[in-house]
Amino acid sequence: MNLENSRNYYGQVLQGSADLRTDACSTAEAPSAEIRAALARVHPDVRARYYGCGFIAPAAIEGAHILDLGSGAGQDAYLLAQFVGESGSVTGVDATPEQLAIADATREWHREAFGHATSNVRFLAGDIENLGQLPLADGSFDVIVSNCVINLVADKGAVFRAAHRLLKPGGELYFSDVYADRRVPEALQSDPVLHGECLSGALYWNDFLTIAKAAGFADPRLVTDRPLGIGDAAVAAMVDGINFFSATWRLFKLEGLEPECEDYGQAVVYRGSVAGHPKRLILDKHHVIETGKVFPVCGNSWKMLAESRFAPHFDFIGDFSRHFGIFAGCGTALPFDTATQAADTTPGCC
């Protein structure tokens, strides 16, 4: 049902982004000058069929091999193709024939626009819920991206498990999607409009964390988020009482990440060497690392930088030889009282 509805909604019902009835499948944030310049080199027919909810352009991807899940007409794929360069590649996967036709028809146009000798982009027809059926080798991608698509599939855990399998060690799943502040009632999940508008399939945010961790992605990191507006009165009435958010997350495939942010007295110094990010690098919403400044980090953040493509751009201070408890301001607070108190005789189990 989900796949059939998605193909119909994005292939037949929607003829362009102006046909959307909510801002769930649209991007509100202002792009950087670098992204604006790259978007200007994307074919107008591709831009007209864009339904993403974020800018999935992670930093430091020169030469990277990227998999785009739910690539649609190809805007994100062609955007990223410029940043990875001719030594990198982008593979797009989508299940809607009309979208794939536009993406494929403009491959040569984009190759010429980018000045590449050969195209570094390819598109595969397939269901992202069944990536094992496609010719994709385990551990073959540096980065996997997705833009407002995972909410459309029924078995979201299958997508995260496949992404973990397809990533290289130290790789990451960097994606934008729609989330709810509570579980969407089952009665709404089969509505074709709510599904196509990326609402009925939106994960309750805490269920997302559980599913991601079960797939092997310990310590998911939130990068950006915004509340969604629903301008269509009929749609708003159907989902009344549920709040929706567009959010971008990054999930690293790393061994040894801990359930909480543990303090080992470590710090990093960003060298300012990532292209397009000379003054600061954003790891996530709570880690904006300025160039040249000693920045204390927990053990997990250390690993995300030291054991990924970001390592050459940082200097690292400390190691894991001493542990100082939970990192200040992160994780769970000490559950015990630190002051000596008289015994409490009130009965109870907690």
Image (tube, rainbow, N blue to C red):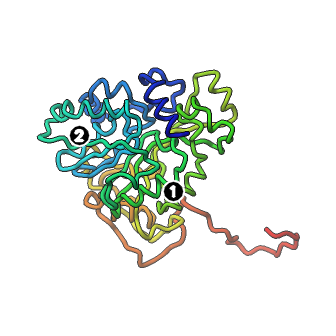
Callout 2, which amino acid? Gln
Q: Is residue 116 something one can see in this rendering?
A: yes
- Is residue 174 positioned above or below 9 on the image? below
**Residue type highlighted by circle 1:** Ala
Residue at the (51%, 56%) spot, across then down: 212
Circle 2 residue: 82
For label 2, count other residues whose C-alpha is less than 10 Å away and answer few (under 14), some (14-19) or many (20+): many
Against 310, residue 322 (above or below) is below
Identify the residue at image location x=38%, y=49%.
Answer: 282
Q: Which residue is mark 1?
A: 212
Q: Position of residue 97 (x, y in %)?
A: 38, 33
Kindly give the residue lying farthest to the bottom in the view shown: 321
Residue 115 in the image: state x and y as whole percent.
13, 36
Q: Position of residue 41 (x, y in %)?
A: 24, 29
Which quadrant of the figure has residue 102?
Answer: top left
User: Residue at the spot x=67%, y=68% of the render?
Assistant: 335
Quarter placement of the C terminus:
bottom right
Q: Is residue 145 above or below residue 100?
A: below
Disc 1 packing (10 Å; few <14; some 14–19; many ≥20): many
Using the numbered discs, state the Cα–Cα distance from disc 2 to disc 1 in whole angstroms.
29 Å
Q: Is residue 98 left or right of residue 154?
A: left
* Element on which disc 2 rests: helix
**Does the image show residue 31?**
no
